[in-house]
Image (spheres, coloured by chain):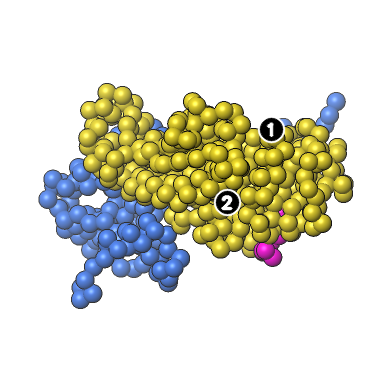
Amino acid sequence: MLTDLRLRDFRCFDALEIFPGPGRTFVLGENAQGKTSILEAICVLLRLQSPRTTATAETIRFGRDRFCLDGHFSEVHLRLHYSSEGREMFLDSKPQARTEDYLDVARVAWFANTDLELVRGGGSGRRRYLDFLGIQCLPGYRKSLRAYEKALRSRNALLKDNRPRREIEAFDPPLIEAGDFLLGARRRLCEALAPLAESACREISGGDDALEISCRSGAEGPLAEALTHTRAEEMRLRQTHVGPHRDDLKLLLNGRDAAGFASEGQQRGIALALKLAQARHLEAVQNRAPILLLDDIFGELDPVRRNRLLASLPPHSQTIITTTFLDWADRQPQDIAFRLVGGRLENA
Amino acid sequence: MAFDYPAPFLQLARELRRLPGIGPRSAERIALWLLSNKDARPGQLSAALSTAETAIRPCSRCGFFATDDLCEICLQPARGGREICVVELATDILPLEKTGSFRGLYHALGGRLAPLDHIGPAQLRIESLQKRLLTENPVEIILALSADVEGEATTNYLVEILEPLGIPLTRIAHGLPAGGGLEHADQITLLRALSGRRPVAER
């Protein structure tokens, strides 16, 4: 659990300190006060990545050249310095060279309004969803993902420039090694998520909606064979035509394609179910609930679904929730609430 | 009007700033130190820089740092006619040399295949390697490149073009680091260590 967090020169904050509770912590505030940035800071400190952007440098406060985040998670002191020249990570004040060691401290599940894109948007968002989970629960996932991306981009650059075949094929073994790992890992993740997402969707919809998720693999069988079979295609298109970069997650609601046939309310329910499944899977493999970050997702839900969602959250997890108003929630005695006004936190 | 340091100072700071890992603040601090600390020896530094710049060049054979046409390693007569160890950078040679167990010659490619940085075979010293192999007749070619994507690709490419020459071709082992336990190794490292296993009796 996260006991304290300090932000310096992060997004709109010059300095901010917050002490979340062990259960639910509400951060209240008007729009554009920086509520989301607090959750983002937690995610960046614990997972070294922002769910809002792929360019972490964007989160440095305007006019500054670095940000610092630090806090304690389960008695481990995490500190992260980030500048345009790179990042430095510390655990208990000791510099860490291996990202894996640093990332091993905490697990996170992130819920936001933009999760609707998981249902409506393109495959890249659903791959990111799987990757966010894979990096947190499968050793070697992060390394393989980075290696695959590098090999793929290199290979595509060579294909585009019409380079000799043996230069292109020099990149095949690293592409295949990382690619087969990713293909298998994502298939296994989908299998593990399917029953969790199905039951979460029933809970949120009150039992009406049957969600079925399955993996649509970007390559049938081993990647080496798939590459051989699509050689003509890739020479014509001048890019790699098969592989995990074409993986997708197929979403069916009551037997029909969710993007096309589900209502907006149902689609929001599916997005929540996917994120709940993620949180529950992390809890199952880690034997410990991840920290849940819920970014202003209640405004779009009717009161019944709001409270069903709150009831569906893993019960023992630390949860930090941003919202503009709080009159809907049945407050529990151990809840903590802060109000964010003008860059300062007050007890609410 | 706002005052600033005199032009020669700013010029010095600008040059220092071009060094790797040096930002504007550090550049200013180093310049100040060089010009005002009593232990600083700016004259010697500048002399050492110009001497090094004119005296050091890459060895025409292997690419290591040399003061003559050939480097110290290539000049040792006992090293010829044995293995040639191919590395990415000239700076990779000393760590191998320090193991004390390699007695052959080196060949630094000057980088590795990196299409995203527009580095292809023509930008590397591959042709000069091929020429060396024809004249030097090594007993073995050892590929000692990094085990990441671009290093792997470069190894694969070299295997492809060197194999037809009929010279024994090996690559350095990869797998568990010395002193590392299995539980700390990631899946790919373990996979490679497994597939690269060898008989216990081999000595």
The N terminus of chain A: image quadrant: bottom right
Element at badge 1? loop
Instruction: Verify whether residue A70 appears in magenta.
Output: yes
Q: Identify residue type, mark 2.
A: Ala
Quickly name the residue at label 1: A300
Range covered by the magenta-colored residues: A68-77
Query: How many numbered discs sit on the rendered protein?
Result: 2
Give the image quarter of residue A162. top left
The residue positioned 61% from the left and 51% from the top of the image is A108
Q: Residues within 10 Å of mark 2 (few under 14, many from 20)?
A: many
Give the prevailing secondary structure in the magenta stretch.
strand
Q: Nearer the viewer, mark 2 or mark 1?
A: 1
Give whichever of A207, A173 is nearer the camera: A207
Instruction: State which chain disc 1 sits on.
Output: A
Instruction: Verify whether residue A321 appears in magenta.
Output: no
Q: Colour of chain B?
A: blue
* Chain in yellow in the render: A
Same chain shared by disc 2 and disc 1:
yes
Could you say where residue B135 lies in the image, as x and y percent from the top left?
Answer: 16, 48
Task: Kindly identify which numbered label has been placed on residue A279.
Answer: 2
Give whichever of A92, B124 is nearer the camera: A92
Give whichever of A35, A145 is nearer the camera: A35
Could you say where residue A275 lies in the image, as x and y percent from the top left?
Answer: 57, 44
Task: Kindly identify which numbered label has been placed on residue B113.
Answer: none
Q: Identify residue type, mark 1.
A: Glu
The residue positioned 23% from the left and 41% from the top of the image is A225
Element at badge 2? helix
Could you say where residue A140 lies in the image, as x and y percent from the top left?
Answer: 44, 55
In the image: residue B135, left or right of residue A246: left
In the image: residue A79, left or right of residue A277: right
